[in-house]
Image (spheres, grey):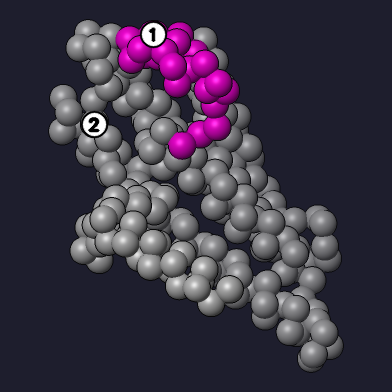
């Protein structure tokens, strides 16, 4: 079971990392458009639409990735102090009551919107000769399915935690700087840091 959970975690991670490259594309497009507008004097009417769509796709496709890392915002003022079983029980109730109805509605509505957009060959009306919208709208149900799949994994994790009393492991990815690991990498001990601090303090005092 754990292998299946980690496989879906890896899938969500891979999709999130893949679409994260849209940041590079979006940054390059913004820089080029600013250069074209203010230096070359040749702005592109479609650029604004494409920027919005790139950001929207990036935002949507990162949802399952963030959920797999337990990174979505939560009101955890008290949650963090709860024992694992109570946390799992609350999460399970919230997934069943709010998450799944909302995501299923997202998938259904997104599928309807995308299908209609493909049928009418929809283009943006924000600017003249706007770019096609149907690829962007297709990302809505795809992102919803990814979220739904990852949500099932999270529910299974809640059930495992309720049975075992502890959370099962997750697929690891890039995290914030871990000070202890950083000290191990550069072979620095706490004693060395203390000695260096004392040395600097004594020398700064003598100079004064």
At 60% from the left and 58% from the top, the residue drawn is: 54
> Percent from the top left, x then y, of residue 81?
44, 16
- Judging depth in this view, the residue of 111 and 196 nearest the camera is 196
Query: Badge 2: few (under 14), some or many (20 or more) residues near its Cα, within 10 Å?
Result: few
Q: Residue furthest bottom?
A: 40
Query: Badge 1: few (under 14), some or many (20 or more) residues near its Cα, within 10 Å?
Result: some
Compared to residue 128, the image places residue 126 above or below, namely above
Q: Which residues are magenta?
A: 71-96
Compared to residue 20, the image places residue 79 above or below, namely above
> Could you say which disc has been placed on residue 169 in the image?
2
Report if residue 80 lies within the magenta region: yes
The secondary structure type at the circle numbered 1 is helix
Toward which corner of the image does residue 25 lie, by quadrant?
A: bottom right
At 40% from the left and 62% from the top, the residue drawn is: 197
Toward which corner of the image does residue 187 lie, by quadrant?
A: bottom left
Compared to residue 156, the image places residue 23 above or below, namely below
Is 159 on the left or on the right of 137, as rendered? left
- N-terminal-most mark, 1 or 2: 1
Secondary structure mainly formed by the magenta segment:
helix
- Judging depth in this view, the residue of 187 and 181 nearest the camera is 187
The answer to whether residue 100 shows anywhere in this view is no
- Judging depth in this view, the residue of 88 and 99 nearest the camera is 88
Quadrant where the C terminus sits is: bottom right
Q: Which residue is mark 1?
A: 86
């Amino acid at each position: 079971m754990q292998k299946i959970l980690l496989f879906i975690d890896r899938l969500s991670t891979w999709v999130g990392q893949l679409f994260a490259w849209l940041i590079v594309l979006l940054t390059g497009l913004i820089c080029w458009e600013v250069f074209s507008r203010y230096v070359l004097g040749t702005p592109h009417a479609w650029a604004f639409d494409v920027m919005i769509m790139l950001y929207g796709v990036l935002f949507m496709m990162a949802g399952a990735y963030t959920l797999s890392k337990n990174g979505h915002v939560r009101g955890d003022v008290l949650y963090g102090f709860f024992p694992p079983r109570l946390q799992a029980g609350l999460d399970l109730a919230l997934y069943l009551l709010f998450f799944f109805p909302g995501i299923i509605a997202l998938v259904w509505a997104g599928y309807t919107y995308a299908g209609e957009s493909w049928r009418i060959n929809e283009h943006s009306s924000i600017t003249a000769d706007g770019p096609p919208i149907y690829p962007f709208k297709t990302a809505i149900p795809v992102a919803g399915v990814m979220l739904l799949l990852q949500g099932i994994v999270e529910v299974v994790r809640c059930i495992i935690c309720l049975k075992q009393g502890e959370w099962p492991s997750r697929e690891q990815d890039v995290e914030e700087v871990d000070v202890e690991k950083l000290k191990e990498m550069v072979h620095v001990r706490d004693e060395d840091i203390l000695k260096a601090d004392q040395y600097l303090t004594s020398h700064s005092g003598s100079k004064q």
